[in-house]
Amino acid sequence: MSSTTAMANPPPAFFHDESQSERLARKSKDAPFFPIAIGICAVTCAYGAYMFKRRGKMSPSIFLMQLRVTAQGLAVGTLTLGLGYTMYNEHFGKAKSEKD
């Protein structure tokens, strides 16, 4: 079998090509805090865009850097809380159900 024949007839794929909305729905079920973190980051960015005109004498680069750090901090904090919540439910939730 030559390499051109292999390229022309790729092996059948065993996975389902999913759309972006299907993938987001699947990931939301796996990690529900991920879309919450994305939403918080988006809201922070929208608020920053609104406040950009009211920044006063602050340099635009400083304002945008502070906005980026705030948005990332809120997103990472939300994901950390979600991870802690998941770990708590897995370790202490099982202990309560095993006692019953």
Image (spheres, helix red, strand yellow):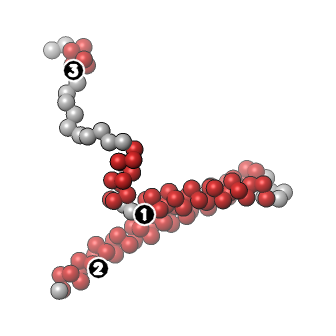
Q: Nearer the viewer, residue 87 or 11?
A: 11
Q: Residues within 10 Å of mark 3 (few under 14, many from 20)?
A: few
Label 2: element kind: helix
At label 2, counting other C-alpha atoms closer than 10 Å, the crowd grade (few under 14, some 14-19, many 20 or more) is few
Q: Are marks 3 and 2 in contact (CB under 8 Å)?
A: no
Question: Sequence order check: which comes first, mark 3 or mark 2?
Answer: 3
Quick check: marks 1 and 3 in contact, CB under 8 Å?
A: no
The residue wearing badge 1 is 33
23 left or right, relative to 55: left
| Total number of numbered discs in the rendering | 3
Spatial CA span between label 1 and label 2: 19 Å
Question: For mark 2, what is the residue?
Answer: 92
Q: Residue at x 35, y 70 (%)?
A: 86
Check disc 2 and give the amino acid type: Phe
Q: In the picture provided, is 99 more to the left or to the right than 54?
A: left
Q: Give the Cα distance between marks 3 and 2.
A: 51 Å
What secondary structure is marked by label 1? helix
Image location of residue 85, percent across then percent down: 38, 72
The percent coordinates of residue 35 (x first, y second) are 45, 58
Q: Is residue 3 visible?
A: no
Residue that badge 3 annotates: 9
